[in-house]
Image: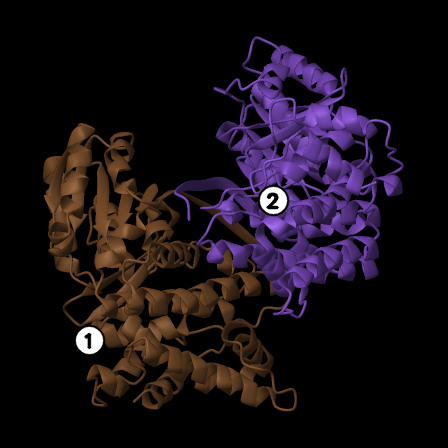
Chain colours: A purple, B brown
Amino acid sequence: MQNFVFQNPTKIIFGKGTEQRVGEQVKERGEKVLFHYGGGSIKKYGLYDRVVDSLEEAGVDFLELGGVQPNPRLSLIKEGIELCREEGVDFILAVGGGSVIDSAKAIAVGLPYEGNVWDFYSTEKEVEEAAPLGAVLTIPAAGSESSPSSVVTKEEGEYKRAISSELIRPRFAILNPEVTFTLPDYQTVCGAADIMAHVMERYFTKEEEVGFTDRLCEATMKTLIKNVPRVLRDPEDYGARAQIMWASTVAHNDLLGTGREEDWASHAIEHEISGIYDVAHGAGLAVVFPAWMKYVYEQDVARFAQFAERVWGVETDFFSLEETALRGVRELEDFFQEVGLPTRLEDMDVGEEKLEEMASKCTEDGPVGNFAELEESDVLEIYRMAV
Amino acid sequence: MQNFVFQNPTKIIFGKGTEQRVGEQVKERGEKVLFHYGGGSIKKYGLYDRVVDSLEEAGVDFLELGGVQPNPRLSLIKEGIELCREEGVDFILAVGGGSVIDSAKAIAVGLPYEGNVWDFYSTEKEVEEAAPLGAVLTIPAAGSESSPSSVVTKEEGEYKRAISSELIRPRFAILNPEVTFTLPDYQTVCGAADIMAHVMERYFTKEEEVGFTDRLCEATMKTLIKNVPRVLRDPEDYGARAQIMWASTVAHNDLLGTGREEDWASHAIEHEISGIYDVAHGAGLAVVFPAWMKYVYEQDVARFAQFAERVWGVETDFFSLEETALRGVRELEDFFQEVGLPTRLEDMDVGEEKLEEMASKCTEDGPVGNFAELEESDVLEIYRMAV
């Protein structure tokens, strides 16, 4: 086990009706607030009104900026930064999924910075200051509600890049599973793939003596495998929605990675796809992860066999751990397919014409991944295996 | 799943050599520091010197108060409060196990309070202010290094009582598994029993739709079951020590109880034993828990069968879940015995003469427990089953 520092101070307020506490939480922390959100769904289903009511009731002085798209765009972020400067905003409230929260984080970082906020994403430039923010989560997926990271897309050049800083961890996150009752199935399962991927990026490590966190990871994955089919059968199954939502936060709050070297190649490989094609990040991960597994599993057959047995209930073939390992990968693919996710690039109408370009961009800052260090040629092979 | 609020801001600094960072951590937070510790073991094995070196190197102005005993005493706490007042202490550093940290928490609470610090323990009086504190942990057991609770013993009347307040959660906790290499076997296993108990107090609930946290609990228990025998075979097995130490903190950092109604009857029942007899808290729990289980398991046979299968690998008898459930309790008892823990009161030289008195004191503020609400007569029966 590696040495580590773990601290996650985000206050999680979880359960039925908890969005009614947003006003009180914001009022404690800000004088002038930007209420940042996405498209129409929060208006359609009443969450927008409930948040506004709570903010008004608490006497919060706020202005709004909606319009965040999936894979949040730099242009709207820049507009948000300008608006916050003009209006003297000192706290940002994100109401939405990972894209809205990531967009809010980018605004928070750009607000006190005189240069171009993209500098933080395109270089190693460290965040030294950021406005505080909080979140009301609507989609269990990205884990951004208690994570220190933000992923943003720059339209020119189709770049999708991430930053990480303790300064952008939300001060509070409000999680009401009822809000997720109205999520379309496809968004639910794309979210589930993202959560699974967050766990798998940590699970597949070469670090030894990490049995405890292995088991925490397995607990989280089994929770998804059990509960995602339940919500597809009954979108208003509160118990299943609640378990998925809490698992999504724990999957990415840093606990599961403590003492481990994490991988993150699949995320890097996927970002090139959704950066160009505007497919859902979770769908892209459902395509990339099985291909990545088939490409790298031979480097630690025992770990992949453990994954097969403990996560998928595959009976271990003691005379062929390799067979057991591959069976686990097939179980993952089958699960993704059964819940309605793509598992091949062609399922998402992504052709082969840009694979070389994507592999090149993915590795332009060097090899990706830690479980296996992947060069441009490796990444290209993984894209080809996903065709 | 119940609504919940979860926030644990304690900064965990984990791994080899991390006690060298104590000076830097304290220096950030206090001007005048009380270095609080227990008996001779931290001096014998060099930790005392390493802490002093780190404090001096960071230029920390500190004074010392050693002598904390297991089941920390109110008298020393009062002495600590006086000393801190005279010297203008504004930060408390606990170096030791749960008793030392709990004693430091009591001093932290008593310092700004004009009355008797026992008031907080003996009544519902809420903590409104406390000095900040940090910890260097030496025994994985109590989880006090990131918990909001403190348990103290008042010598007159042999009372052992607990408080809980966010204000006494340590600001940082330094966990170096190497420090635990020199723990005597008996302390190691008493610690393990305490950790198991912290998980089981949360695991046994009547709350529904808590599958995710069930699995997190099971992951933690399996980690102990696997690694405790390893450190008994080789006390310097870093990987095993590290997994036990990190599991001990996670077991009691509130995550495993999120959304659940917790029980805590066994702790209350045990406190009466170690309050009078001065037996190790963990040993007392190893005696009380199996007796409690046998007394209450019929109230939720399915949960106890799940415990048997998932935690202990008992093969489910589908025609008698009750047999499966009882088999799990026997596995727990066997495990405790195999690692050298008592499982009966007589193993700890505790006779039957005070059982009535203990049952009466245990329930003097009303019934204990939530999985099953236990009156005085129930508690007495559990003590008798543990004879």
Q: How many marks?
A: 2
Residue at the image position 37 percent from the left and 86 percent from the top: B382
Image mark 1: chain: B
**At label 2, which amino acid type do we have?**
Glu
User: Residue A258 at what x, y percent from top left?
Assistant: 47, 46
From the viewer's perspective, is A229 left or right of A207? right
Left or right of B220? Residue A231 is: right
Q: Residue placed at 29% from the left, 75% from the top?
A: B284
| Distance from the alpha carbon under mark 2 to that under mark 1 | 50 Å
Q: Which mark is residue B276?
A: 1
Q: Nearer the viewer, mark 2 or mark 1?
A: 2
Amino acid, disc 1: Ile
Q: Residue at label 2?
A: A201
Is residue A329 visible in the rendered image? The answer is: yes
Secondary structure of the residue carrying numbered label 2: helix
Question: Are discs 2 and 1 located on one and the same chain?
Answer: no
Q: Quick check: B261 above or below B6?
A: below
Q: Is residue B320 left or right of residue B287?
A: right
- Foreground of the two, A64 or A127: A127
